[in-house]
Image (spheres, helix red, strand yellow):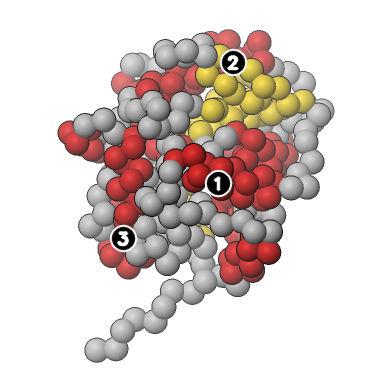
Amino acid sequence: MSAPPPPWVDPEVPAMGAALRERGLAAPLLEAAPVAQSRAAYDAIGAFLSEGSVPLQREAQVQVPGPHGPVLCRVHLPDGAVSPVPAVVYFHGGGFALGRIDEWDAMMRELVRDSGAAAVDVQYSPSPEARFPVQFEEAVAVVRHFAARGAEYGVDGDRLAAAGDSAGANLALAAACALRDAGETPLRGLLLYYGVYSWDTTADSWQRLGDGRFGLSAAQLDWIRDHYLAQEAQRRDWRAAPLLARMEGLPPVDLHAASLDPLLDDSNALQQRLQAAGVPVRLQVHDGVPHGFIRSGRFLSAARRAVAGGATSLGHWLGTRAALG
C-alpha cells in the first residue's frame, strides 16, 4: 500500500514564512528555549503581523477586577456606533504562556469592523507564573464583569458573546460552561478558533500532523500542559479540558479549525459532542493552513475569511449591523 499523499499547503503559508525570515523573525522550539526567549520571539512576530493595522477611533485599555488581582483588557468600539454596543469578550492564544493583547489588535479591529460589535481583548495571567485554575477563574470573572457593568465601557452587557483561539478558545468554552452551571446566561454565542479542548494526543490528527512540520507538535503540547497545569489529575478536570464538560445548555457555537493542525480532531470531537447535546454548531475547517493562523490576516486570505466568518456569526447572535449584510 502506498503512503498517503502529503497534505496540501496553501502557497500563502510558505510565502509568509519567507517574509518572516526576511525580517529575521523565527520562533525557537518552545520546549527547548527559555520562556522569556519564546515570549520575545512571539511578540516580535505578532508585532510584524500587525504592521499597518489602522486603529479604531475608540480603543481603551482598562483594568477590571479579577479573583487574583486586576485583569488588563482592551476595549475596541466600532466607529460611529452609539454606546452601549454588543460585544465579544476575546481570549487570545499562545499556549497560556505567550502573547499580549497588542498582538491581536489587527484581528480585533477587523472583527469589530466586520461584525459591528465591540471586542474586549483580555490579558489573562500567563503561565507558568500563574497556573490553572487562575486563568479559568479570570475568564469567568471578566465575562461576569462586562455582563454586569459593561455600560461603563460602552458595552451592552445583555448582548455578549465569548471567543478565543487555541488556549483562549479553551478558556472561552470553559467559562461558558461554568456560567451555565451557575445559572447565568450572559452569552449569546461562542466563536472558537482551533482550540485545545483536551490533552489527548492519541487522536488521528495528532498521529498525522503532530511531528512539528506545521508548527505545533506533541512535544510542544506537553510543554504547554506542564507549564499550565499544577497536577497531573487536572488533565481530567473539565475546567482545564472542556471537551470533558457537559455541553447541554450552551449557546450556539461557531467552530473554526485548520487542516494542518494536530488539534483538528479536538474540534471534530467538540462538534460531535455539541450536536449530541442539541447545541447549534457549525464547524469550518480552513484548508492548507496550520495552527495559529488567525492573527496572520496580513498574509493569509484564510485568516481573513475565518475572521469574516466569525464576524457573521457574531452579527447574527448579537443583532449588529453585520447581520443585515
Who is closer to the viewer here, 155 or 108?
Answer: 108
Count numbered badges in the picture: 3
Residue at mark 1: 42
The residue that appears at 49% across and 74% down in the rendered structure is 8
Residue at mark 2: 63
The residue that appears at 43% across and 74% down in the rendered structure is 7
The quarter in which the N terminus is drawn is: bottom left
- Specify few, some or many for label 2: CA neighbours under 10 Å numbering under 14, 14-19, or 20 or more: some
Report helix, strand or loop for mark 1.
helix
Q: Residue 47: x and y, percent?
A: 67, 45
Which amino acid is tagged 1?
Tyr
Residue at mark 3: 206
Quadrant of res 18: bottom right
Which amino acid is tagged 3?
Trp
* Mark in the foreground, 3 or 1: 1
Quadrant of res 232: top left
* Mark in the foreground, 1 or 2: 1
Task: Give the distance between the C-alpha atoms of the residues marked 3 and 2, in whole angstroms.
Answer: 38 Å
Quadrant of res 115: top right
Report helix, strand or loop for mark 2.
strand
Mark toward the start of the polypeptide (1 vs 2): 1
Who is closer to the viewer here, 174 or 233?
Answer: 233
Mark toward the start of the polypeptide (3 vs 2): 2
Residue 150: which disc? none
Mark toward the start of the polypeptide (3 vs 1): 1
Task: Give the distance between the C-alpha atoms of the residues marked 1 and 2, in whole angstroms.
Answer: 24 Å
